[in-house]
Image: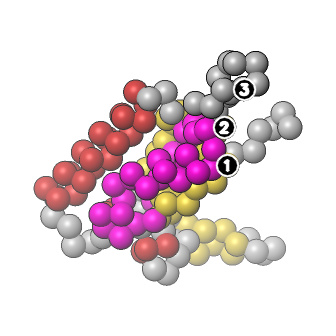
Amino acid sequence: MPESPDGERAPRSTFMLIFRGGAVSQHDLSPSDLQAHVEKWHRWSDALARQGRRTTGTALGAPGAAVRGRDRVVTDGPYAESKDLVTGSMLFEADSLEDAVDVARTCPTYEFGGSVEVRPVQDPRT
């Protein structure tokens, strides 16, 4: 972690990883392949927790619904393509956006064509 001008460690910022697609959007995985992949996720998440980075995360279930527009029209599922489906998210701490992207690059989701969006979380005090 970078040091502040007074020699103390600068506080980390909070980022959100938004996971799309990946193994959970694949319908042709065997139960054993899915279980092995889920175990990789647990190891990855646990490693972040041991580093003091992870604060919370969750996988999302399917199916879902979307409410859109002024008339609040409800449709089944938010996306037509499974690769665009938000499958989970995680809040964690990083020193910078570059550090957060480096963490995102280690995510197991890429093994099955998933993607990760990295976003800073706004501090409500500023």
Alpha-carbon span between mark 3 and mark 1: 20 Å
Q: Are marks 1 and 2 in contact (CB under 8 Å)?
A: yes
Crowd class of label 1 (few under 14; some 14 to 19; many from 20; radius 10 Å): some
Vertical placement of residue 77 versus 96, above or below? below
Alpha-carbon span between mark 3 and mark 2: 14 Å
Q: Is residue 120 left or right of residue 37?
A: right
Alpha-carbon span between mark 1 and mark 2: 8 Å
Please state which of the two labelled residues, at mark 3 or mark 1, is closer to the viewer.
Answer: 3
Q: Write the start and end of the magenta stretch as one range.
A: 87-115
- Residue 32 placed where, x, y %? 13, 56
**Which residue is under mark 3?**
4
Q: Is residue 26 left or right of residue 78?
A: left
Tell me if residue 79 can be seen: yes
Q: Mark 1 vs mark 2: which is more N-terminal?
A: 2
Q: Nearer the viewer, residue 86 or 69?
A: 86
Crowd class of label 2 (few under 14; some 14 to 19; many from 20; radius 10 Å): some
- Residue 10 placed where, x, y %? 68, 27
**Which residue is under mark 2?**
13
